[in-house]
Image (cartoon, helix red, strand yellow):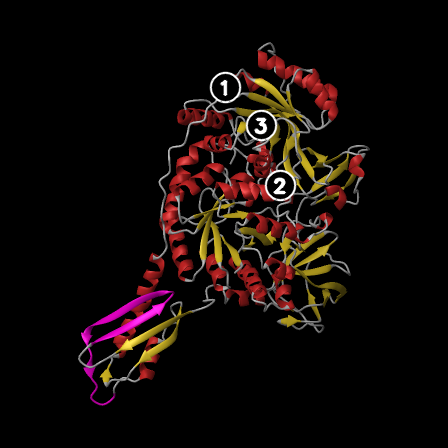
Amino acid sequence: MTELLAPAGNMEALKAAISNGCNAIYLGMQKFGARAYSSNFDLETLEEAVKYAHLRDVKIYVTMNTIVFENEIEEMKTQMDALNNIGVDGVIVQDLAAFDYMVSNFTDMEAHCSTQMGIDDLEGTLLLKDLGAKRVVLSRELEIEKVKEIRKMAKVPLEIFVHGALCISYSGNCLMSGLIGYRSGNRGRCVGSCRKPFELLDKTDGTSLGKSYILSAKDLNTIDHINDLKGIDSLKIEGRMKEPAYVANVVSKYRKALDNTVTEKDKDDLYKTFNRTYTKGYLFHEDKKDITNILRPNNSGFEVGRISKTMKGMYEITLTRPLNQNDIIRISHNNEDINLTVVKLYDRDGNLVNSADKVCYIKIKEKLSKGDLVYISKDVQYYKELETSLDKEFKRFNLDMKVYAYPGAKLIVDAEGLGCNYMYESDDVLEEAINNPTSRDQVIKQLSKLNDSIFELGHLEFDECNAFIPAKLLNTARRQIVDGLYGSKLNRQKKRTKTSKSPEKIGFEPKKPYLTATVNTKAQYDACISQGIHEVYFENVIRRNQNQYKEKDGQVLVGGYGGIYHYKDSNPFITDYSLNVVNSKACYELYKLGAKRVTLSYELNKKQIDDLIQAYKKENDSLPALEMIVYGKAPLLFTKYCAMKKMGECGTCKTKSYELKDEHGSFPILSHEDCSMTILNGKNLNLLDEMSNIQNIEAFRLNFTVESEAEVVDIIKKAQSKLDGSGFESVFNQSTDTRGHFNKEIM
């Protein structure tokens, strides 16, 4: 059966999801979840949530899918131990340290690989399956045909997103929020930098293609394709930041779709809670230019009419859908929004009305124009309907009972429900009835009072044997039976742990630090070779996402898990920054897979790098082999989307260069041959002055992207002088350079 997986940012949303038919819930704790700004759960409320869900045959998965710094490792382990004790069904992880602790220590609590790990191919799926993953959450950029192919070949349960907000970047491959605002998406604190307005500039001639929300993705909606989705193991609805009414609305519609009862009105009702307009996503081959809504980054609502004229100091709205008093509407006037609550609604004669379906009138101070579109952003009547479904029972479970009632004996009820049995026996014996023995109908009446439980009375066996059973006794029996079955159901949850073996130590001999380089052009490559850099990553770069693995000679730089799986037995490999390595255990796991060196994350500061090295040394009696990027324009995000195509400039990237600009600076765009793009930071990460103070790093990398050949040579000479100690003057330029996170801890 296909699992319908719903989000819950709090207990109210969890109940809304379960009451509307989900099969599983994913939620976060106060730490380590990729939605730090959601209400989230503590251990006490989580325990309540698990009991509530498990009684209703709904599973609970906890998100612990942030990167985990060295000083958080023990806290991460303690939290996972607590989750297992509570009886959580699975934990969704990104960091290899968290993943390894999951698979090494728990038998029944499953390790699920977060979409933050960037798995978008068969090879990555197979690697994580081999390492012990029980489920892989695939990237949102995959087409349905490839999802099905991976499922068929990998034979491991897969989860995909089917509804809700989309990241414009491959998840886990976005540093934009962290590098611009020090709030990392990999730490669950994304500030939504992509939802801001940007100006797209043609750098070739300096012209502007306009200012818009060029990176703001529409919301995903795949309900029209539900039959194609039914073969996938788990269908995930995004929305842990959303209100309970949103959860109720979306879950109920996808439940109906899976059950083949969804109507066109149901689908239309999806517009009545938060949406940024909808896309069928890359999953169902949406054109890249239609992935974004560049006009607005927030709730769009749904169109209900337009301003048709002014009359007697009022504006007339010609309606295509009903409008009710107290609805919240948005009127689009000259690309500006006017938002208001319809406190007063008038008819043509100026009379107050509660609702209208063809024409109505409103009084507002703002200036409007004929033709301005009117949208409902909150349909109050519909919200009232949703609120009635927030904590009802979606389904009730049969409670079957055999009642044994004989004069002179105790009342015995043999009950079965939730796959469990419970035998009730009264303290007192029953008396023989003098006039009116208890009838079958009377027994049914008392034992069927189950509305405050998850049960409904199923099959009941009762032979009338002239016994008198007090109604109070039957009520007591019913309550004890319900409580007893609840306890039996909850106690069946297995929480077994494993005894993990002591890991083999892996260490490396210290080496004198040297320079490596990543380049984007042949001219940059030649410049690096001419300056004596022996390890230059150019045609041997295997990026994290969107790969077709080709055979390579010699060493490769691997950015994703699929690349590791493909090349680990054929080529020496170094792992790139995009694996988001921030702790010693993640390093160890990559060395175990064969990595020659591990490149550290951009999101580490100086102290955290030292903590990582010291922890590794303590555990392995030797140093790790590390690479660190110390110069270059950091990649803010990598995306399948193309901003130029959106603006009607498809193909011009072959002869022109572009950048995005906001009030803080500019961000160059690297266009790739497959029409994906990387957005770079406008400032150069420059830690060249710091290299002499950074201990136990084997290789310092220079990352060249848009630099000319002469600039490459100049930077290499400065870096070499700093590395060999001959350069004494600072090479840091305050106006063009940044030290990134080196001296400041990211949130």
Identify which residue is drawn at 57% across, 11% down: 725
**Residue under pointer 2:** 193
Q: Main secondary structure of the magenta part?
A: strand
**Residue 662 makes an appearance in the image:** no
* Quadrant in which residue 691 is drawn: top right
Task: Identify the disc placed on residue 695.
Answer: 1
Amino acid type at circle 2 is Ser
Q: Nearer the viewer, mark 1 or mark 3?
A: 3
- Image spot of residue 626 (x, y percent): 53, 25
Outermost residue, bottom side: 435
Identify which residue is drawn at 74% across, 21% down: 709
* Quadrant in which residue 447 is drawn: bottom left
Closest to the observer: 37 or 372? 37
- Image spot of residue 545 (x, y percent): 63, 40
Contact flag, marks 1 and 2 (Cβ < 8 Å)? no
Question: Which span is picked out in magenta?
Answer: 410-436
Q: Nearer the viewer, mark 1 or mark 2?
A: 1
Residue 120 against residue 569 in the figure, above or below = below
Mark 2 surroundings: few (<14), some (14-19) or many (≥20) residues within 10 A: some
Closest to the observer: 504 or 623? 504
Q: Earlier in the sequence, mark 1 or mark 3?
A: 3
Q: Earlier in the sequence, mark 3 or mark 2?
A: 2
Q: Is residue 425 left or right of residue 684?
A: left
* Label 2 residue SS: helix
Task: Identify the disc placed on residue 572.
Answer: 3
- Image spot of residue 618 (x, y percent): 40, 25
CA–CA distance in space, label 1 to label 3: 25 Å
Q: Nearer the viewer, mark 3 or mark 2?
A: 3
